[in-house]
Image (cartoon, coloured by chain):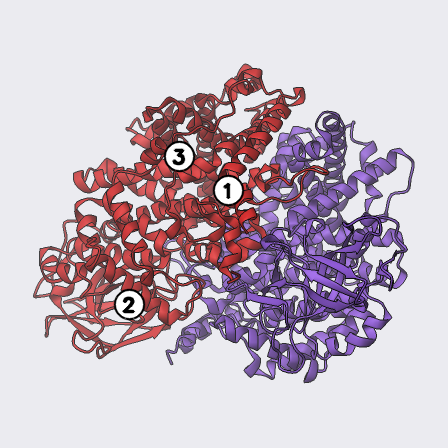
Chain colours: A red, B purple
Amino acid sequence: MDEMRGLLASEVAQRRLDRLASHFCEANLAKEEKVSREVCAKPFQRSVNPTILANLMAGGYPADRQKIFDFFISRPDLETPVEIAKAEHRELAFKQLKALVNEASIHPMKLLMEDPARYFTITEAIGFIDVSLGVKLGVQFSLWGGSVVNLGTQKHRDKYLEGISNLKFPGCFAMTELHHGSNVQGIQTTATFDRMTDEFVINTPNDGATKWWIGNAAVHGKFASVFARLKLPCPDSHLDTDMGVHAFIVPIRSMEDHSVLPGIEIRDCGYKVGLNGVDNGALRFRNVRIPRDNLLNRFGDVSRDGGYTSKLPTINKRFAATLGELVGGRVGLAYGSVGVLKAASTVAIRYSLLRQQFGPPNKEEVSILDYQSQQQKLMPMLSSAYAFHFATEYLVARYAEMKKTHDDEIIADVHALSAGLKAYITSYTAKALNTCRESCGGHGYAAVNRFGTLRNDHDIFQTFEGDNTVLLQQVAGDLLKQYKRKFTGGALSVTWTYLRDSMSNLSQTNPVATHREGYTHLRDPRFQLDAFQYRTARLLHTAALRLRKHSKRFGSFGAWNRCLNHLLTLAESHIESVILAKFNEAIERCEDRQTRKVLNMVRDLYALDRIWKDIGTYRNQDYVSPNKAKAIHRLVEYLSYELKGAAGSLVDGFGIPDALLRAPIGLQSGQYSEYSHYVGFE
Amino acid sequence: MDEMRGLLASEVAQRRLDRLASHFCEANLAKEEKVSREVCAKPFQRSVNPTILANLMAGGYPADRQKIFDFFISRPDLETPVEIAKAEHRELAFKQLKALVNEASIHPMKLLMEDPARYFTITEAIGFIDVSLGVKLGVQFSLWGGSVVNLGTQKHRDKYLEGISNLKFPGCFAMTELHHGSNVQGIQTTATFDRMTDEFVINTPNDGATKWWIGNAAVHGKFASVFARLKLPCPDSHLDTDMGVHAFIVPIRSMEDHSVLPGIEIRDCGYKVGLNGVDNGALRFRNVRIPRDNLLNRFGDVSRDGGYTSKLPTINKRFAATLGELVGGRVGLAYGSVGVLKAASTVAIRYSLLRQQFGPPNKEEVSILDYQSQQQKLMPMLSSAYAFHFATEYLVARYAEMKKTHDDEIIADVHALSAGLKAYITSYTAKALNTCRESCGGHGYAAVNRFGTLRNDHDIFQTFEGDNTVLLQQVAGDLLKQYKRKFTGGALSVTWTYLRDSMSNLSQTNPVATHREGYTHLRDPRFQLDAFQYRTARLLHTAALRLRKHSKRFGSFGAWNRCLNHLLTLAESHIESVILAKFNEAIERCEDRQTRKVLNMVRDLYALDRIWKDIGTYRNQDYVSPNKAKAIHRLVEYLSYELKGAAGSLVDGFGIPDALLRAPIGLQSGQYSEYSHYVGFE
């Protein structure tokens, strides 16, 4: 045992890495690979100052993060066990949430309203405890609380805010129906105004209109903000007038004995793929009467006599305003998804550095991260985690700015940005989680090493708060709007200004640039960003042309669907451009030269790996020559190899404490052989 | 409720599809897409004769399959609940296995020995019941039973076979150690011969040598075939001679009271990401003594006086022979993985046909499979399931032939083929399962709809019985051997003969063919197969050159690692070529013209989608012109659209009964709204 511990201690591992590093670095000098001496003559790059990196990555509120870490580390009784049944998990998540508010004195509702960036810091930290807890928190504060605060008026805050904050009023956000998830405008639940009693009558007209997947509904919720079609009696007819989707506060369980209130039917949505700490339920309403005051009336109100007033002129505008207020959820998911990616890649990379298998004949085995294939799986992933970190930091800052200024331009920017980043990052992380499990082989399959839970819990991030495919279409729609503006001479919003330049260069490919394949050129952030932006601009231009052509014949819906794959690629390409630009800006802000050097390498890998992944497009446009394409591929392999030396420090930089990461194969203390103790051998 | 049922009944859905089909088909006639009239003038293709298709897909032993289906449908008490704790799941899986053998009178051990194709039919069918049951069955019969039968001699069969068959001797296959999984030759458990007592002494020398992940060990196993280094006392020295890895039968629990035997230590490997119906454990041995007879001595034996005899001359040859006998497990995994892919794609496609969301303004919503993006996610997957089906049928037939003839050429073929198909198919299916969940949105996240369990259970298919990355390297190694043979004038094995032709055409790209982009040409199986084989041959040729160059400088291990990504791509490319060739052969064998037509379309999509996915490589070699590349992409989108009309029939062809598929959103009876009943609304 002691022998093993010695063998695997990080110092020895480091020495082994050094040895291999020099071996491979020499290898990379081989002529075939055309690595310029200038690159390789530099000392092998892994000396990152851990404190500088940790500070850079800790975000704006490291003390809050630490407070949460310390609290949960001090409370092992609140730790989610490796195996836990649904019923217990639900109770535990609620207990964790109550402890967070009442014992650790973290007040998410207050932070959400006063300092959103701080709120998101907390949600990311909470995700490391248990993703179910993070979602439970999001349901209570961001969704239920957010709907009251953002869609209601002062009277609602006065009545509900305290109970929401201190968890005396656990609540639900009842929007999704069995038959309508993405298409919220198609929901069928009704809220009909009864002038006789000054009440709304909430009704579920058919099976498909059952509210579905409602968090907090199955067990803990006392209220729900219910999205329903507002129906007003029409003076001239027997039919009601449909005023579109509005939100209403509906009490669902008794404050006294928690019994389900009359007219409410609640069922348990049952066991899920993941997130079983969240009690999702189905809700039906049979003539449930609520006071007129329960209409969340910020964007539209009903008077005592059934008259309707709104500052916004149309149903569509009101609907957009209502949904628009819920954008915070997407920001939180994008941010939280990066946290999951950090945790998983930390475990996978630490294990791959220590785990040895095979080696040269009659020599010691090498670590599995010494294999080119393993580097290819994990190093671009690590670089993506860094890229996403800076992009979501920017998103959170913009969101906070939006909440402060209510500036229209920023609102539009945050909407498109949060939709795009949420979709792009959660899709990437979902795939990465599979790669992490697979790259850790059998030991990755032990539940204690977390990949299963992280994957299963995170999976639905791709779907809730806006299905990714739908969100990317919103981004594409936004880009097309910007495209039109360009031709009508309007101003582009900040994030899109690059398109003006890129678009004007579309017709001319530069034959010299096409053939440049030197490493200095390929690692130039200007070349990388140009390539990203060229691709986006080209996709946008051709999408606009195709849509215009097809619309005449097939109508806008038909034309859109005929170009759908194209539009989704366009949206992803744009988001990648934004991520890269924000990464560059973050590096420029970093004051430590050594750290900047490492981050440049991380950024190079992020950028070139993405270009290589879509090399067919670049080749098809002759944006790069065949030899340049090959040079890019070689450089991706080389950077993946070289970054390996800094990989340990880079994951340390994510700053996830061992006690919360928990995975025996992924601890910073690096005692992989401790794993055998996990099953109970002494 | 009735209204909903009516709306969603399959007839109505079909009519809706017809209407949309004609709409889109017209759309695809648009000039920009260059779809030749010849293609679209044909009636929209979806009339598959269900009986003919079902017969084609039922495999060689439909009666066995049906017998298993009928038995489990008649026994709801054996159905695995949606949520089940590890401890209960383990007992249930054992109960299911015992019922299969003792009540349904299915005798897997007998079938495995007498008619492997029939055995694999059974394992696929069993996978639809519960993948844990399939793996439990595999551990007992294929691994534990297989090691006794294939590595032992008649005395072992006489003593153990009956007990293995009737489950009185549940057993383990103890090969993997904590520190050595893939590198079996590196295992450290020892079996030292004690001449004094005529026994072997089994020992676990250190923590890392703990046998790990051993199925049947934690709870049910009474025996284990333990892989250990055979140590023989050396007459001239105090040191023992290491004779390499051999397998030994070691009793681990008492036949009387099931207590763990002296010197054996067993621990539970705990909760896993999936397959929690299988009781994996860790095993340590402290001077455990077993009779000399317990050496499984087919490939090497020890005499009473400690002498060693073997028909095989070297440790490496004996090791290869030992591992070689275990190839059946890989065949089973490849075959079973296709079953999982069929189940998941059945659910995802049926749901996507029925689920509606959004639509043209003021019109009915369309089904989500009407979206180009959803077609892109699911239709190439469906075509892959068909392609894999025929490829694994071929593999099973070759395996059966190998067991009958013991022909060296067939042995080599089956080894490479099973390694390649296992790796390629399980990796594909693992990714596809994520896509299925994601493409079904929120409802895909309900555990009852099966994606979670299928994914979590299947996940480890990528790792056990040979890590995919390691197996693909074996395929690459084999290809390089064949490449050498070609130059030394030797014969190539059957599966590789194509390389001779493809390789001789490498230097010349045909400028006419490069630019041909007509649909008749692109849908010509000859063009498709040529493209696949060209790619493989080119990758093989360049890999051989690179390896030769680097070996001089970095040794064979270093050179291999420098080319590792290249070699893995080579192996995958070869396997894709084999799959396509077997698909073509299967279509040629099909006698029904109409079915053949549909299968041709499925094959076209499989082939062209793969070519498009690697279009960068084809463009870089100027194998296809830019316009041809675009034509391929358009055709992939078009085929994905057109195949949608046959998708329902094609998944019905997989023949999985509703009662076993269970997922409410994926039933053939098509009552999607039944889903609301699942949670208990009346």
Pointer 3 and pointer 1 on the same chain: yes
Q: How many marks?
A: 3
Is residue B535 visible in the rendered image? The answer is yes
Of labels 2 and 1, the one closer to you: 1
Residue at position x 62%, y 68% from top? B217
Q: Is residue B74 above or below residue A677?
A: below
Residue at position x 51%, y 32% from top? A645
For badge 1, the amino acid type reads: Ala
Which image quadrant is residue B406 in? bottom right
For badge 2, the amino acid type reads: Thr
Q: How far across and how far down the image is residue B482, in percent? A: 83, 40
Label located before the other in sequence (3 or 1): 1
Pointer 2 and pointer 1 on the same chain: yes
The CA span between labels 2 and 3 is 39 Å
User: Any mark on residue A579, and which?
Assistant: 3
**Quick one: B429 or B164, which is closer to the camera?**
B164
Is residue A487 visible in the rendered image? The answer is no
Q: Is residue A286 above or below residue A445?
A: below
Q: Is residue B551 above or below residue A2?
A: above
Determine the secondary structure under disc 2: loop
**Quick one: A22 or A152, which is closer to the camera?**
A22
Q: How far across and how far down the image is residue B33, in percent? A: 58, 40
For badge 3, the amino acid type reads: Ile
B547 sits to left or right of A669: right
A126 sits to left or right of A448: left
Q: Chain of mark 2?
A: A
Q: Residues within 10 Å of mark 1 (few under 14, many from 20)?
A: some
User: Any mark on residue A189, and which?
Assistant: 2
Residue at mark 1: A9
Residue at position x 39%, y 69% from top? A86
